[in-house]
Image (spheres, helix red, strand yellow):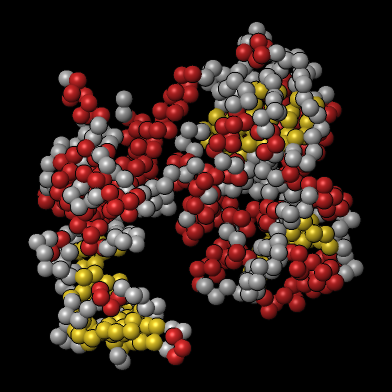
Amino acid sequence: MAAESANQIASPLTQPVTVVWGVGAERAKLLARLNIFTVEDLLLHKPRRYEDRRKFLAIRELRAKESATVRGKIVAAGIKRWKKGTRAMFECVFDDGTALLHCRWWQAQPWMEDYFAVNREFVVFGKVESLRPRTIDHPETELVEPEDDEFIHVNRIAPIHPLTEGLTARVMRTLVWRALEKYEADITNPWEAGGVSPGAPSETETRRARSDAPYQLPSRANSVRMIQFPEEFSDVEIARRRLALDEFVVLQKQIRERRKKFETNAQALPAGGDNHLIKPFLSALGFKLTDAQTRVLREIRADMRGEHPMRRLLQGDVGSGKTAVAACAALMALESGFNVALMAPTEILAEQHFRNFEKWFKPLGVKVELQTGNRKTSNIQHPTSNTQLGARAEHTTRDTQHVSLFVGTHALLTGGFEIPNLGLVIIDEQHKFGVAQREQLVRKGRYPHLLVMTATPIPRTLGLTLYGELDFSAIDELPPGRGRVKTLVRAADKLPKVWEFVRGKLAAGRQAYVVYPRVEDTGESGIKAVTKEFANLAKLLAPHRVALLHGRLSGREKEQVMADFRSGRAQVLLATSLIEVGVDVPNATLMLIENAEMFGLAQLHQLRGRIGRGAHESYCILISDAGDPITRVRLKVLEQTTDGFKIAEEDLKLRGPGELLGREQSGMPNFRFGDLVEDLDLIKQAREIVTQSP
């Protein structure tokens, strides 16, 4: 029985890749460069493309500017050298009996003459550059060797895997075949109780999967064979979907187990409050909360009165009023006698929060402290003891004389900085922080409540995977009384008219942001930098004063620049994307962004959110000369909609999830087969499988 249990735990697939015939110590080192360490890693090494070698194209049938695969023997080869030996090109000529094909490599290597020897036969893949003569530059080639395993490489749809120097496509394909032949019976379902019955893949099963609905997927073992050595090209997508489902289920199980463990170990602090601070705060606010804000606050209060500590993600588009909701959440904890920490990604945003919260909370008798790398308002030594931290109050209201809201940047994470009696952690612009940083701040208390906020709308496909352990709230309406924002995309040759328009608005008393992608000039043609353009812009917009803001200024300098812009002493703020979060100047109604193609859609939407905060109509003008059709389509999206969720979905499709959030920052898993853009149905199915499992 014990031996049986051990076999279940130690799968043959977890053995080192050296158990596969043909993998010695040296080859294992090469495979390690591709992150292949085990048998399973080798079996799941996804091909990057496939070649149909069931019937090769005749060389005489090649077409210009099209990619093709042919098979032929070398009839001539050699190196062509230019005068003075500055350049050397290697060229060989293939013959398949129908015509000749010239293949050229513009950087000749010493090994080529021996490898591309006359009478050797090769499979050649590449894009045909010309037909007179028929020529392919830098093709992919594979030597045809008359061996017993020739059937693995020709007369089939052949996989072409990612490689590294020293490993050929033929060797990689052979190793995968050998691993599959020996270990296919050990490939079982990683998430279903009991796994999948081992055995050879069923032809009936494969045919059924090809014709059935998307959810009728083949077994995992069959899927691995289908993706490595498909019988039909349609097999590849069928297999990919099954293997993607496995990845999503494993991830959802991990999320569920983390949540269960957390709820088992963590007892919530009673921080629902009693309204004695929130009521006067809302009365003095000067505006009424929207229905969406009120709904979200009810969800937050229920969490903070619940059995388990709150773990909630608050999404809200630019200008939707997340800060007011965060203030109410903070007051609930403060009313209950707990300290609150609010972490922002930049000093500019932290300073702005500090000013807002001090203005709001000072009349309520609540202290607001600031902790950034540049400025600290207090060393914070509160008399609350550790025994109080773990104690449960007998009634809702605690003594609020010694509790504070601590606003800061990463400086809140420093080891010597402690926040006793921490009841609530608020993270603003969550996607700007790593998962580890979030946890580091939470660990300064004993299971405090956690509210993470983002104005970068996260498409649901990402939300289901990245933040599955968090509950979702969304503020899906904007407060009334905001000015309309018009977005216009213009080519650089329209800049004289654009600047004329800007000067007119400045003369009428409005203020403007001008955004460039670089701090310093890097020599890239046509890419503007704020430090280089500052003098030109100051002259162009005179007599209106231009202020300069970028990340290399000191904290004190940034603070002074922002104070000048907020007060109206400076009418134009020339900046990098540093201003994308947290800058709130209602009189700023213009934003001009040059080299707009250098920014992501979600980032441009964030930048655009700096205007339209007052009652005046606002204008965001995107300047771009990008000729790429995809770039033009991207920028047109911003002209057509101000819906952040639609923009985020489009950004996800065009740039991918890594561009939208950043894998390192978000903790996003690196899927081999899953596609967060296309596989929403599989993500939903994975959640259903995990929810229904015991």
Q: Which residue is at the front of the view, 305 or 351? A: 351
Q: Quadrant of residue 15?
A: top left
- Front position in the image: 395 or 89: 89
Residue 317: x and y, percent? 62, 47
Quadrant of the frame with the C terminus: top left
Quarter-wise, where is residue 228 in the image? Answer: bottom left
Q: Which is more toward the observer, 15 or 228? A: 15
Q: How many marks?
A: 0
Q: Residue at x 31, y 92 (%)?
A: 132
Q: Residue furthest top?
A: 394
Residue located at (74% from left, 28% from top): 405
| Residue 298 shows in this picture | no
Which residue shows up at 40% across the image and 83% down it? Answer: 88
Residue 588 at least partly seen = yes
Residue at left offset 54%, top offset 68%: 631
Q: x, y (%) of residue 94? A: 22, 83
Q: Position of residue 552 (x, y in %)?
A: 74, 54
| Rendered image quadrant of residue 99 | bottom left
| Residue 377 vertical placement versus 177 (above, below) | above
Depicted 489 relative to depicted 331: above or below:
below
Q: Position of residue 23 (x, y in %)?
A: 23, 50
**Quadrant placement of the N terminus:** top left
Residue furthest left in the image: 148
| Residue 35 located left or right of residue 564 | left
